[in-house]
Image (cartoon, rainbow, N blue to C red):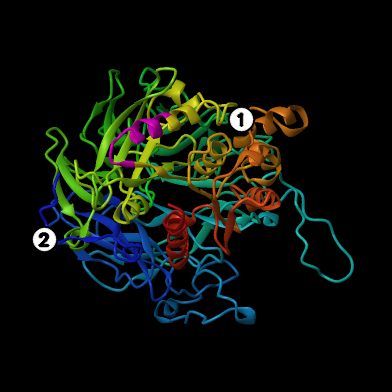
């Protein structure tokens, strides 16, 4: 398809500062208005800014509720529709004794943000608190003052209280206090739990508890205690109970990935577990009648490759059942993008008989309606798109939808017709200015006849039949159970703008193609999936306009693993970039925050019993065969794929006198490419594409 805009310019890395990310649509209780979040990176402050927008469901009368000077997010409507509670990192006043306001006058006080921390280091991150604001206008009012911040707000049905989650120190209610020590106080850490650090968290010294806060006097009440964390609270329609997600099993310190649905009786404080505990459940949602709770998940906490099902149960746990057992689709969005914030994917009740959910299938993510009485779920959105969030406003579906050459925008359609109409698209200006590249859909056949889905971005300057040959970059996604698809990646579009063709695929192990396909990589990383990627390279290389002498390859996380594995087994690539990678299964078990859970399951072995197997499937074992010039990009605070994985690879290749370079990003974790500090996100892009520019 030709671009009819007058002289569109190429996309640049710095355009990342101009792209707005729309997220978290929420409908008012009466369906008359919707709220959503509009986020953008701010170059001056090297941070993120976001505002809350409100409009009619058709996009009319849209206006800002908050200014966007801070990072405001997660708007939730009060039951009467007059007010929003939201999360914000704006400066606040804390009462360290109990997290409540010392006086009403505190609302008017301004706490200046520190210019620098101790010894000139950057200040600590601002704590996020809950705030309220009247939708028709007025100043935001601070609702919580918890020392560790507050999140995950849910209103009581009478609008008098808000339940939320806030983290408290583990030793506050711990059954095992740290040992008493004589002498001077030092800064050592005393570890009692197997899971003692996490990516994006660092060392885990706090546990999230359930709290409530009153709107009138802002007094708070702690509803849960101990070392069992709480997430995703949901208040019952009668106001007497709160459902939440937690791992309260007896051996939770070891099996920390379990999650079950629990119900708290507010008056008595009694907590009832309503699902199996050796499971992976989340997203509880009460039915309008309050007689059922819907939730998402499956019955094997260790297996992340299983389809997430739509379940319901009574508030006492009776009658629990899965409603999508015969649907070989996971009720979640496994799609990936570097231009998306996490948004609601479901379940959402439609009356007392139907549930709406986002589900990923063959590169697309759509909204489906599940009839609890049975039958195949019905798609309410169609086309080569990815839906990243939705809400229901009266008889209309409001949803976020994007495509390969367009960032997600907000749309509205009738629930029974499906006539999509734009509601909000803050990227219209930049879309009118820059050239974005569509993709060619590919069907790839692996050597064993398995069909693999893929896409090919055409590069700037491409013209069929011109005789010009173009460089090619192969992109491999993380996961491995994530999914590439019909969502825009700024990174890939930037490569296309620089003259590269970009091929990306969903090899075996990817989500969106059924349980058997997704789980086929267990214990066979590299062997099961490399043939799919190479088949795509072979197919695209046969095109007359691809320069087969200038092919590069890159990927992050699992994609970094597979990049390492492939260049240790195939020397056709002239340059490679491995990002936040895995190189050694044997050491990953004990150094990653998920090594003893995800690692033990996915690699199908543990070091003391299966050392030979773990090393056989580790790219570090084939480092002597790597001759491709390699750039290693890794964050120093990555606990998911620890930087020791990169250090091993860099040291080995340096010892072998191979061409290798190593870029370390300080103070960043595993999510650098999607939510890291803006300046470092840009630096990463320049290093990534610069390596290919210099070698291809």
- Residue at the spot 51% in from the left edge and 68% down from the top edge: 100
- Classify mark 1: residues with Cα within 10 Å, few (<14), some (14-19) or many (20+): some
Quarter containing the N terminus:
top left
Evaluate if marks 1 and 2 touch, with contact meaning CB atoms under 8 Å apart.
no
- Residue at the spot 55% in from the left edge and 31% down from the top edge: 526
Relative to 131, is 20 on the left or the right?
left
- Residue at the spot 11% in from the left edge and 57% down from the top edge: 5
Relative to 446, is 562 on the left or the right?
right
One can see residue 679 in this view: yes
Front in this rendered view, residue 411 or 478: 478
Front in this rendered view, residue 590 or 535: 535
Residue 254: image location, x then y, percent: 69, 37
Residue 169: image location, x then y, percent: 65, 58
- Which one is closest to the eye, mark 1 or mark 2? 2
Q: Mark 1 or mark 2: which comes first in sequence?
A: 2
- Magenta-colored span: 535-546
User: Magenta includes 568?
Assistant: no
Residue 424: image location, x then y, percent: 19, 55
Helix, strand, or loop for circle 2? Answer: loop
454 versus 426 height, above or below: above
Residue 217: image location, x then y, percent: 43, 67
401 versus 278 height, above or below: below
Helix, strand, or loop for circle 1? Answer: helix
């Amino acid at each position: 398809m030709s671009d009819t805009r007058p002289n569109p310019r190429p996309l640049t890395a710095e355009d990342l500062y101009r792209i707005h990310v729309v997220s978290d649509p929420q409908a008012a209780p009466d369906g008359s208005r919707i709220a959503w979040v509009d986020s953008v990176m701010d170059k001056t402050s090297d941070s993120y800014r976001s505002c809350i927008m409100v409009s009619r469901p058709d996009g009319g009368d849209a206006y800002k509720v908050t200014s966007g000077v801070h990072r405001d997010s997660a708007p939730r409507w009060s039951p009467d529709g007059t007010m929003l509670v939201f999360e914000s990192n704006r400066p606040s006043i804390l009462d360290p004794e109990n997290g409540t306001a010392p006086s009403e006058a505190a609302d008017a006080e301004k706490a200046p943000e520190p210019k620098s921390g101790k010894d000139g280091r950057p200040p600590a991150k601002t704590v996020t608190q809950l705030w309220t604001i009247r939708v028709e206008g007025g100043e935001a009012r601070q609702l919580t003052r918890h020392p560790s911040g507050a999140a995950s707000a849910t209103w009581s049905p009478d609008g008098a209280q808000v339940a939320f989650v806030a983290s408290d120190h583990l030793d506050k209610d711990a059954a095992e206090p740290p040992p008493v020590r004589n002498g001077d106080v030092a800064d050592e850490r005393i570890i009692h739990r197997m899971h003692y650090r996490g990516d994006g968290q660092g060392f885990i010294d706090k546990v999230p508890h359930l709290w409530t806060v009153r709107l009138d006097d802002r007094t708070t009440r702690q509803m849960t205690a101990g070392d069992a964390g709480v997430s995703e609270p949901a208040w019952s329609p009668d106001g007497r109970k709160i459902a939440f997600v937690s791992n309260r099993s007896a051996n939770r310190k070891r099996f920390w990935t379990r999650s079950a649905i629990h119900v708290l009786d507010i008056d008595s404080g009694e907590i009832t577990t309503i699902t199996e505990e050796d499971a992976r459940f989340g997203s509880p949602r009460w039915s309008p009648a309050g007689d059922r709770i819907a939730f998402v998940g499956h019955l094997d906490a260790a297996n992340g490759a299983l389809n997430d099902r739509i379940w319901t149960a009574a508030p006492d746990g009776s009658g629990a059942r899965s409603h999508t057992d015969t649907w070989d689709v996971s009720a979640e969005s496994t799609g990936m993008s570097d231009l998306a914030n996490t948004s609601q994917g479901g379940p959402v009740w439609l009356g007392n008989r139907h549930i709406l959910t986002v589900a990923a299938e063959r590169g697309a993510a759509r909204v489906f309606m599940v009839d609890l009485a049975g039958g195949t779920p019905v798609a309410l959105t169609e086309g080569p798109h990815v839906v990243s969030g939705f809400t229901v406003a009266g008889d209309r579906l409001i949803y976020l939808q994007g495509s390969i050459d367009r960032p997600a925008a907000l749309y509205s359609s009738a629930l029974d017709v499906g006539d999509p109409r734009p509601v909000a698209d803050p990227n219209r200006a930049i879309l009118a200015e820059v050239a974005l590249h569509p993709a060619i859909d590919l069907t790839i056949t692996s050597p064993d006849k398995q069909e693999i889905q893929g896409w090919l971005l055409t590069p700037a300057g491409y013209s069929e039949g011109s005789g010009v040959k173009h460089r090619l970059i192969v992109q491999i996604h993380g996961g491995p159970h994530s999914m590439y698809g019909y969502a825009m990646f700024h990174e890939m579009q930037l490569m296309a703008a620089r003259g590269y063709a970009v091929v990306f695929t969903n090899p075996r192990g990817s989500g969106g193609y059924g349980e058997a396909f997704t789980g086929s990589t267990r214990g066979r990383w590299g062997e099961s999936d490399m043939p799919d990627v190479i088949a795509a390279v072979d197919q695209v290389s046969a095109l007359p306009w691809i320069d087969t002498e200038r092919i590069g390859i890159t990927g992050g996380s699992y994609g970094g693993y597979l990049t390492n594995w492939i260049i240790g087994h195939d020397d056709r690539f002239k340059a490679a970039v491995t990002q936040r990678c895995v190189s050694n299964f044997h050491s990953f078990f004990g150094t990653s925050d998920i090594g003893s859970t995800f690692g033990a399951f996915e690699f199908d072995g543990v070091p003391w019993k299966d050392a030979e197997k773990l090393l056989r499937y580790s790219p570090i074992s084939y480092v002597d065969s790597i001759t491709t010039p390699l750039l290693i990009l890794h964050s120093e605070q990555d606990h998911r794929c620890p930087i020791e994985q990169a250090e091993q690879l860099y040291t080995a290749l340096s010892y072998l006198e191979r061409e290798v370079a190593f870029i370390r990003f300080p103070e960043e974790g595993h999510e650098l490419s999607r939510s890291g500090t803006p300046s470092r996100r840009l630096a990463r892009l320049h290093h990534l594409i610069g390596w290919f520019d210099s070698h291809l």
